[in-house]
Image (spheres, helix red, strand yellow):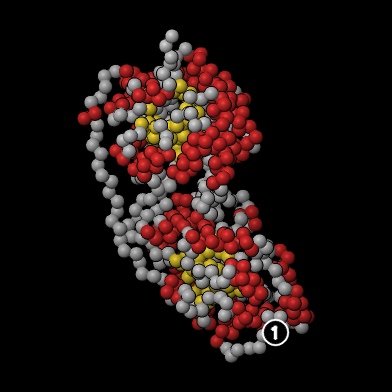
């Protein structure tokens, strides 16, 4: 009695043919685009079984389980996280049943895709949570009886490494196929070159490395051959999309024909690829065409297109430092927050900017949609202020509501306009503003964006590692709350921002100099970056109590609330608010490297009055300060 070869033994004797798209066939079978495709393993198992059977009948040697998105992170979007193990085991069982029913010797690959959320520090998902999600899915697939694990469509090498390491721990006997997806520039979206991916996968101990999804066969094969040159000791796989999709009559259409995929399969085999198949848009017809091509006359490897070296844009010189960069830690900075107009007329904000410059402001902050209210883009205001007033601005740059493409494009646009000082923040949630249903999604957290700017853009590459020519010259500030309830957590977050390269910090408003002293004491002295302290002049008693009771993280001492109440009674609340701001500013000036004034209700005249104390004679401070 002969024993059937294992997956790795079968690979060694010639290329194996993998199946094609799962989603394409399930949608064609009537599964809604809104439905969780992985859950179909439970609710409509006959559809999944039929799909596997079609690919096996077409000649596939390997069928992938319908579990690409069956990790608890993605399943949470459908309230199905509690069914993660059941969905994966069902997926493995259905694929195995299809193989048995076909009567062929074929292999079941447990499909594992990315988690759908970025890993820290660029994304919100802690490494430990990612590892636990992969471990749960891999354990269920192994229990379901898969022959191998196939990691596919990963864009971040760090995330793939977490998945592979979890597999080594959970299922050490299962062969691993690890595939990443690449963009037209032949780098992953996270910036990894084919050579970097190959080197990393070699060290991770996978059986097969490869490329899937991406644009189409031509790109996928070029990238895989580059990986092969970098690390020839590994086996390689290729599973491209059926070209770039287009939308017609409400459906996604893929242009690459089965005949084109047949030619691709012959080229892939000639190049030494050991696992060949299709991804999005491919069907059993594509699989059948590739099966026939692989059984026919082999292609002479000498006829493969020659790989040409990649050409990167020449690196230019970094721009000279901004005035802010030259001023930090050398003199006391005075900056005032300004709000862009609601309409297209910027004359008023420019006029106020001129007044603040004359009053002694050294820089001006330009907010981005404060309180989630629709306003003119802050880049435009910052550009106009710099151009017409002659004072540098600090552009507020929230990560909320921006994907990674827009983030980088917006930054390059601001830089081209000469706006190079950034204050990176999370941003106000849309639900509190004019458009509560606007997208709240984000691809990168503030600490991750700070790192991206300093470690990529300021070094001449984008986040994907593509050269952008001249490096940017951004100066990046971060947010800080010295009065946070959990000061240890706030300090830990600040350290992450420091690791990312923050050049300065702008703090939340301070109403008690003791807040600054407590922070510095808890930090262990002055942090290794200038802190520009937030200062919010109180306008009246109502304003003071609103800030105290309704703004998270800000506490106003009872003495100040009482002073505002007394001043209100005598009709002098505005003057008292300015006086309090003067006292706080003078008391904290020796401890801080600047002041960031936030005038209430866009009363820029109040900011000018606060600045005036810096040029006046010293005043006696009240006892509580």
Give left or right: position of 173 versus 219.
right
Q: Nearer the viewer, residue 124 or 282?
A: 124
What residue is drawn where x is 50% and y is 52%? 122
557 left or right of 482 in image: right
Picture coordinates of residue 323, whole percent (x, y) = 42, 74
Name the image quarter holding residue 254. Answer: top left
Tag 1 secondary structure: loop
Mark 1 residue crowding within 10 angstroms, few (<14) / some (14–19) / many (20+): few
Q: How many numbered marks are there?
A: 1
186 and 567: which is toward the camera = 186
Picture residue at 62% right of the left edge, 67% below the top: 522
On screen, 338 above or below 288? below
Where does residue 597 sit, x and y in percent of width and height?
A: 58, 74
Q: Quadrant of residue 607?
A: bottom right
Residue 362 showing in the rendered view: yes
Residue 483, picture quadrant = bottom right
* Quarter of the figure with the C terminus: bottom right
| Residue 259: percent from left, percent from top | 33, 24
The residue depicted at 32 percent of the width and 21 percent of the height is: 293
Looking at this view, name the residue that lies furthest to the bottom. 617
Which residue is labeled 1 in the image? 622
- Say left or right for 209 vs 23: left
For image coordinates 55% across by 87% down, the residue present is 615
Q: Extreme top residue here?
A: 1
Q: Quadrant of the N terminus?
A: top left
Left or right side of 455 for 556: right
Q: Is residue 568 visible?
A: no
Which is more toward the observer, 570 or 505? 505
Image location (x, y in percent) of residue 468: 35, 55
Q: Is residue 560 above or below residue 133?
A: below
């Amino acid at each position: 009695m002969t024993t059937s070869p294992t997956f790795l033994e079968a690979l060694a004797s010639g290329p194996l043919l993998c199946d094609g798209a799962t989603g394409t066939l399930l949608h064609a079978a009537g599964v809604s685009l809104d439905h969780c495709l992985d859950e179909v393993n439970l609710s409509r198992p006959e559809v999944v079984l039929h799909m596997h059977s079609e690919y096996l009948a077409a000649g596939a040697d390997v069928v992938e389980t319908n579990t690409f998105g069956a990790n608890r992170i993605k399943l949470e979007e459908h309230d199905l996280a509690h069914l993660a193990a059941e969905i994966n085991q069902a997926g493995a069982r259905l694929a195995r049943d299809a193989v048995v029913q076909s009567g062929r010797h074929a292999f079941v690959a447990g499909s594992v895709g990315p988690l759908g959320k970025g890993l820290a520090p660029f994304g919100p998902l802690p490494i430990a949570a990612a590892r636990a999600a992969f471990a749960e899915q891999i354990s269920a697939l192994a229990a379901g009886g898969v022959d191998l694990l196939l990691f596919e469509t990963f864009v971040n090498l760090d995330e793939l490494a977490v998945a592979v390491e979890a597999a080594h721990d959970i299922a050490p006997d299962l062969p691993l196929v690890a595939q990443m997806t690449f963009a037209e520039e032949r780098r992953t979206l996270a910036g990894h070159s084919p050579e970097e991916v190959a080197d990393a996968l070699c060290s991770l101990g996978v059986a097969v490395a490869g490329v899937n999804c991406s644009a189409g066969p031509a790109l996928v094969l070029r990238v895989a051959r580059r990986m092969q040159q970098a690390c020839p000791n590994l086996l390689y796989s290729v599973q491209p999309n059926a070209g770039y999709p287009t939308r017609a009559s409400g459906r996604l259409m893929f242009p690459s024909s089965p005949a084109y995929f047949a030619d691709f399969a012959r080229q892939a085999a000639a190049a030494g690829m050991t696992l060949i198949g299709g991804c999005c848009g491919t069907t059993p017809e594509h699989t059948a065409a590739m099966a026939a091509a692989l059984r026919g006359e082999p292609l002479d490897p000498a006829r493969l297109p020659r790989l040409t070296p990649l050409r990167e844009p020449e690196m230019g010189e970094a721009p000279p430092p901004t005035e802010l960069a030259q001023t930090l830690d050398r003199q006391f900075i005075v900056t005032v927050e300004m709000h862009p107009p609601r309409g297209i007329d910027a004359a008023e904000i420019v006029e106020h900017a001129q007044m603040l410059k004359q009053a002694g402001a050294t820089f001006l902050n330009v907010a981005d949609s404060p309180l989630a209210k629709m306003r003119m883009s802050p880049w435009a205001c910052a550009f106009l202020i710099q151009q017409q007033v002659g004072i540098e601005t600090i552009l507020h740059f929230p990560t909320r509501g921006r994907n990674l493409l827009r983030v980088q494009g917006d930054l390059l646009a601001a830089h081209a306009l000469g706006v190079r000082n950034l204050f990176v923040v999370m941003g106000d949630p849309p639900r509190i503003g004019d458009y509560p249903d606007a997208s709240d999604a984000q691809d990168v957290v503030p600490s991750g964006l700070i790192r991206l700017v300093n470690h990529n853009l300021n070094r001449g590459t984008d986040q994907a590692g593509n050269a952008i020519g001249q490096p940017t010259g951004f100066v990046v500030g971060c947010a800080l709350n010295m009065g946070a309830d959990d000061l240890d957590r706030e300090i830990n977050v600040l350290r992450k921002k420091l690791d990312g390269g923050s050049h300065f910090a702008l703090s939340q408003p301070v109403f008690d100099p003791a807040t600054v002293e407590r922070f510095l004491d808890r930090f262990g002295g002055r942090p290794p970056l200038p802190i520009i302290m937030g200062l919010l002049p109180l306008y009246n008693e109502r304003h003071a109590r609103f800030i105290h009771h309704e703004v998270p993280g800000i506490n106003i001492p009872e003495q100040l609330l009482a002073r505002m109440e007394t001043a209100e009674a005598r009709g002098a609340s505005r003057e008292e608010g300015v006086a309090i701001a003067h006292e706080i500013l003078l008391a904290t000036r020796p401890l801080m490297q600047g002041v960031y004034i936030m005038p209430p209700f866009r009363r820029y005249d109040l900011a000018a009055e606060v600045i005036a104390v810096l040029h006046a004679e010293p005043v006696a401070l009240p006892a509580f300060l």
